Image (cartoon, rainbow, N blue to C red):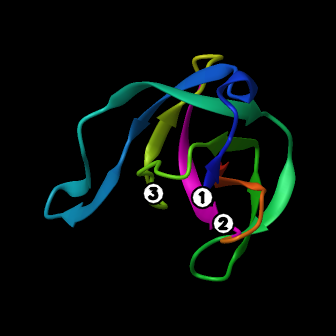
Amino acid sequence: MVSLPAFLLRHRVVVEPYLGDSAYGPRYGPAVAGVPALVAESVRQVRAADGREVTSTAQVIAEPDLVCPAGSRLALPTGRKTTAISVAHHTAPGLPVPACTEVMCE
């Protein structure tokens, strides 16, 4: 599997992976700071995991091994905090194209 070239991942984000709900609300794992990513803050219509059509205001492309399930919290390079709406792992086994993880954020 070919990974994204490091020179394309110009931004750094902070990811707090969503672990599930507890009696006191959502639970998050320890924050992982300095995650290399390519961030585009643009408005797009996307589908959430439950099928609803929602608006994404930021898209994050990162390494294929990123642990960021839907519901995770992210801090973008601008300082804005957001939540992951959907996560897609793009792979093409056997083809010479890079694999990556795409996170659509609120």
- Dot label at residue 101: none
Nearer to the camera, 14 or 51: 14
Asked whether 50 or 32 is in front, the reply is: 32
Percent of width and height locating residue 68: 45, 52
Would you place residue 8 above or below residue 23 in this image? Answer: above
Q: Which residues are magenta?
A: 80-92
Q: Which residue is mark 2?
A: 91
Query: Which residue is labeled 3 in the image?
Result: 71
Q: Residue at x 43, y 37 (%)?
A: 15
The image shows residue 3, relative to residue 34, as above or below, that is: below
Task: Return the residue found at the far left.
Answer: 23
**Residue 90 among those drawn in magenta:** yes
- Residue at mark 1: 1
Please, what is the three-letter code of the amino acid marked with disc 1?
Answer: Met
Q: Disc 1 on helix, strand or loop? A: loop
Q: Main secondary structure of the magenta part?
A: strand
Q: Position of residue 86 (x, y in %)?
A: 60, 63
- Residue furthest out toward the top: 78
Q: Residue at x 56, y 43 (%)?
A: 63
- Amino acid bearing label 3: Gly
User: In the figure, 105 relative to 85: above or below?
Assistant: above
